[in-house]
Image: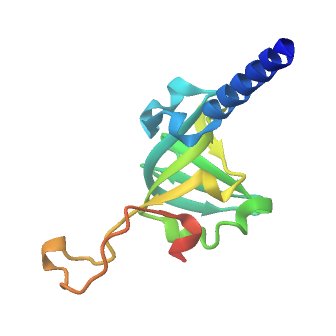
Amino acid sequence: MRTFLFIFAVMAFAVKAAAADTTPASLLKIGTADATNHYGQDMIVTGRVAQVTIRPAAIFLNLDKPFPKSPFSVVIFHGHSSFYGDANALKGKSIEIRGKIKNYRDKPEIILNDTNQLTVLGSFPFTSAPAAMPTNAPPEMPVTNFPEIM
């Protein structure tokens, strides 16, 4: 009986440790310029979509600067692009990307396979400053998932 309890305790600890490593809270959040220091690691990369390029095989989101000076790219292959809707709606938006940073032609990138990997950071829906906002305006949403902005 003790052996069974010991094995059960070890297995429970192993499952808990494995779950802790894959939770988004355990990922380090970095800017696009730091991504080159984290190849092969799962991270959260933040940046502003400077350019959206739609090609026959994939959609490319270049963050912070347009190609070829972009410090970081997001790739959505067309097999997964239907999950994201109109990618052009992301231009100018601040986003967070979760995933493994890969080195492609000496530039960092993350390939999106799931809608949970991309989060659009909340932005104010009016062009004026918040002080000029109507008093009956809804409160600003701090974070929304990409499909919800459509």
Q: Residue furthest left?
A: 131
**Horizontally, is 126 left or right of 11 in the view?**
left
Measured as percent of width and height from the top left, residue 75 is found at 66, 51
Q: What residue is shown at x 32% (from left), y 70% (from top)? A: 140
Q: Tell which of 63 and 138 is nearer to you.
A: 138
Does residue 16 lie above or below 54 as drawn? above
Measured as percent of width and height from the top left, residue 144 is found at 48, 64
Q: Residue furthest front?
A: 1
Measured as percent of width and height from the top left, residue 106 is found at 61, 30
Does residue 68 lie above or below 37 as drawn? below
Q: Is residue 105 visible?
A: no
- Callout count: 0
Q: Is residue 9 visible?
A: yes
Q: What residue is shown at x 63% (from left), y 43% (from top)? A: 110
Display coloring: rainbow
Q: Quadrant of residue 131?
A: bottom left
Q: What residue is shown at x 27% (from left), y 83% (from top)? A: 137
Q: Quadrant of the C terminus?
A: bottom right
Q: What residue is shown at x 23% (from left), y 87% (from top)? A: 136
Measured as percent of width and height from the top left, residue 35 is found at 51, 32
Q: Quadrant of the N terminus?
A: top right
**Horizontally, is 33 left or right of 81 in the view?**
left
